[in-house]
Amino acid sequence: MKFQKTRNTAETKLDISLSDDGAKSEINTGVGFLDHMLTLFSFHSQLTLTIRADGDVEVDDHHVTEDIGIVLGQLLLEMVKEKQSFSRYATSYIPMDETLARTVMDISGRPYLSFNCELSKEKVGTFDTELTEEFFRALVINARLTTHIDLIRGGNTHHEIEAIFKSFARALKDALAANDVQGVPSSKGVIE
């Protein structure tokens, strides 16, 4: 399954595709640290991403980071609707050296993000670390996931954010995994 979307605004121009075909991801956001995190996201979720982004990074990285989260969330929602059979719930603890992150996820159709991550520094290179939460909020709301992300142990800020991205990706992989039960994994018979 391959899903593709473009988004053009006065602030960003995005062309993004998402699939589970196992192909190599191609990610170019114009934001080096975000490219690195999305590459990790792709690898640990086992989802293929093709991202071409052109944004107003001369202002800052906010618009491109948030808009990529929006579009990825929309594509994930399309993928979930197409799958119609998946595990739904997942929990992932990921250490990154001295840091430890946990993500608990429900592909519920009810968008909610609890982001309890006190990051050590305000920047990693030129990347504003507060954009980590902005990215996940945009993704989670648009994918209609219930997600709790916690940074349990901190340390190096790069490691903290890397653990968060990997934890989210692994939880997503497990939540999307095939379910023994045929059909939508809900007693209501529907997830919307």
Image (spheres, helix red, strand yellow):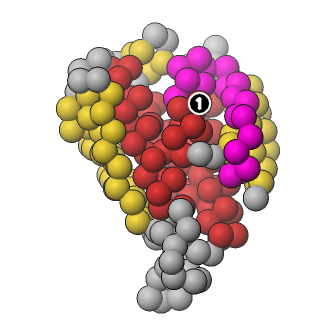
Of 18 and 137, the residue lying toward us: 18
The residue beneath circle 1 is 39
Task: Note whether 32 is above or below 21 in the view shown.
Answer: above
Instruction: Give the residue furthest to the bottom.
Output: 188
Residue furthest to the front: 180
Tell me residue 192's x, y (percent).
56, 76
Choose between 96 and 188: the one closer to the eye. Answer: 96
Quarter occupied by the N terminus: bottom right
Is residue 70 visible in the rendered image? The answer is no
Q: Residue at x 70, y 69 (%)?
A: 82
- Expressed as whole percent of the image width and height from the top left, the position of residue 159 reads 35, 23
Is disc 1 surrounded by few (<14), some (14 to 19) or many (20+) residues within 10 Å? many
For residue 68, above or below residue 177? above
Foreground residue among 152 and 140: 152
Q: Is residue 50 left or right of residue 41?
A: right
Q: In this view, does 136 lie to the left or right of 159?
A: right
Residue 77: quarter of image = bottom right
- Does the magenta-highlighted stretch encompass residue 156? no
Q: Is residue 21 magenta?
A: yes
In this rendering, the answer to whether 85 lies above or below 4 is below
Residue visible at 40% across and 24% down in the picture:
129
- The picture places residue 62, in percent across and down from the top left corner, at 54, 28
Region rendered in magenta: 19-37
The three-letter code of the residue at mark 1 reads: Thr
